[in-house]
Amino acid sequence: MELTNTKKSRQLNSKTKMTLQCYLMLSTQIIGFIVLTAYPIFWAAKWAWFYFDNIPQNTRFVGWENFINIFKDSAYWRAWGTTLKFAVCKIPIELPLAMLLAVLLNRRIKGQGAFRAIFYMPHIVSVAIVGLIFSNMFDYFGVINGLLTKFGVLTEGVNWFDNPNTALMVIVLASTWSTFGTNMIYFLGALQTIPEELYESAYLEGAKPFTVFFKITLPMIAPILQTVLLLAINGTLHINDLVLVTTNGAPGGKTFTVMSYIVKQFVPGFAEANVNIGYGCAMALITSVMYCIIGIVYSKLSKRLSEIY
């Protein structure tokens, strides 16, 4: 009996140590979640019901007023339109490009590893640096206007940031260049899970590469495609710092996305002094709810992708 009890106590001690080790390994992430995610959410949820401008004597409870005013805020809804337009322009460029490069790099070619590193490298570069690079490239006296006038495409330089459509195009190009490498890696990992026997059987049956891609490759990676597309939608809807660095909302605030509009107008350090931070908190909560709705709708619509294989 004593030996049995000793073994049980040792097993319990071992399990306890393993549990503590797991929590210690996760402690940084847990602390980060509490400090950087959970606390800000509860803080915003509290002040969303107040007029709050960081001056204690001005703080007062306003109830639903902040939330009601959001539906009258044309600038906020215009920012939503810009965000959706950005997503519609970027995703059809980014994902096919990432897929194409992944298919090419999945083959045995010379310098395969170097190409993978080169295409992924833009993702390592700071978004602020990416914004500065593209804003300088598309400046009136930048390299893009210089090349286009040199080769006769343009007779004179174009001020890309004076027009909301061309300014948004620059942001789309900058964001695509910065993030397509990550999606390429996701697709590449998915492609490498497909058994070679499927391709060999298809080619023996006389299938063409185009047919093989749509009948074998795409269906086999459909569950991963579902996740990649969700991440792409989430990333485009949350775009913020790239807009602030590249255009800062110009011209006339017409290139503000939802997140960049909230940050620029209501976050201390970016916004003007004495702004109603409570209204910004209410706006952030409404935006979060809308993001959740978009995520739920996407999950429902894309459910078939996860059930193909």
Image (cartoon, rainbow, N blue to C red):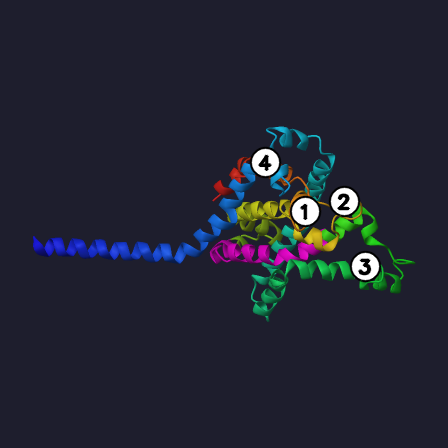
**Could you tell me residue 77's position as x and y percent?**
70, 36
User: Looking at the image, do the residues carrying marks 4 and 3 touch, with CB atoms under 8 Å apart?
Assistant: no
Residue 279 in sight from this viewpoint:
yes
Q: Amino acid at mark 1?
A: Ser
Q: Quadrant of residue 279?
A: top right
Disc 3 target residue: 139
The residues tagged by marks 4 and 2 sit, at their Cα atoms, a distance apart of 24 Å
Disc 2 to disc 1, how far (Cα)?
10 Å
Q: CA distance from mark 1 to mark 4?
A: 19 Å
Image position of 183 with respect to 146: above or below: above
Residue that numbered label 1 is attached to: 260
Position of 5 with respect to 180 (left or right) is left
Q: Which residues are magenta?
A: 172-201
Where does residue 167 sit, x and y in percent of width and height? 78, 50
Query: In the image shown, does 203 or 158 lie closer to the viewer?
Result: 158
Label 2: few (<14), some (14–19) or many (≥20) C-alpha neighbours in 10 Å: some
Q: Amino acid at mark 3?
A: Asp
Horizontal side, residue 139 vs residue 152: left or right: left
Residue 145 sits above or below residue 37 on the image: below
Q: Label 4: how many residues lie within 10 Å, few (<14), some (14-19) or many (20+)?
A: many
Q: Secondary structure at mark 1?
A: helix
Point out residue 34 in the picture as x, y percentages from the top left corner. Answer: 47, 48
Pointer 2: what residue?
Answer: 253
Residue 68 counted in the magenta span: no
Q: Nearer the viewer, residue 43 or 220?
A: 43
In space, the residues marked 3 and 1 are separated at their CA atoms by 21 Å
Q: CA distance from mark 4 to mark 3?
A: 39 Å
Q: Residue at x 52, y 38 (%)?
A: 304
